[in-house]
Amino acid sequence: MIFQVVRAAGGRYGYDALILLKSLVALCVAAMLLRTAILLGARPTVAIPCLALVMILAAARFLERPHIFGYLLSAAYLL
């Protein structure tokens, strides 16, 4: 259903906008997780490589599906 709405609203660029939104959500999740790690006392020299590994592993889960917003809200809750 969401793909039909995106196609109807954005035309041929609708899917590109959806991928951009997905990328922005992934960046927000990464930023919130990094901020949370730093607030909990992790040094940035340790937190950033760990976050990079986590984001590489999670990349397969960042699909154009509603659950990516759950990841964002979970990261906001941890923050």
Image (tube, rainbow, N blue to C red):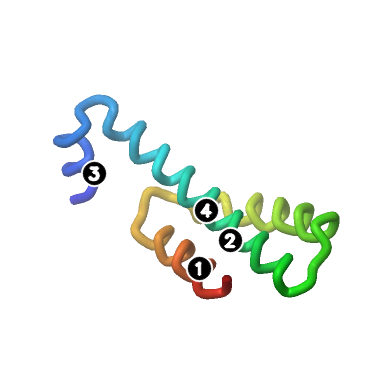
Q: Does residue 8 appear to the left or right of 17 in the view shown?
A: left
Q: Residue furthest top?
A: 12
Which residue is tagged 1? 76
Which amino acid type is marked by label 4? Cys
Mark 3 vs mark 1, CA separation in Å: 26 Å
Q: Amino acid at mark 2?
A: Met
- Name the residue: 65% across, 50% down: 56
Q: How many neighbours does mark 4 have within 10 angstroms: few (below 14), some (14-19), or many (20 or more)?
A: some
Point out the tag, 1 or 2, that comes first from the N-terminus.
Answer: 2
Q: Amino acid at mark 1?
A: Ala
Tag in front: 3 or 1: 1
SS state under label 1:
helix
Task: Read off the residue under disc 3.
Answer: 3
Mark 4 or mark 1: which comes first in sequence? 4
Q: Which residue is mark 2?
A: 32
Indicate which disc, 3 or 4, sits on the residue closer to the N terminus. Answer: 3
User: Going by the image, does 61 lie left or right of 44?
Assistant: left
Residue mark closest to the camera, 2 vs 3: 2
- Label 4: which residue? 28
- Upstream in the sequence, badge 3 or badge 1? 3
Judging depth in this view, the residue of 76 and 74 nearest the camera is 76
- Under tag 3, what secondary structure? helix
Residue at image coords 57%, 74%: 78
Mark 4–mark 2 CB contact (< 8 Å): yes
Establish if 12 lies above or below 1: above
Image spot of residue 23 (x, y percent): 48, 43
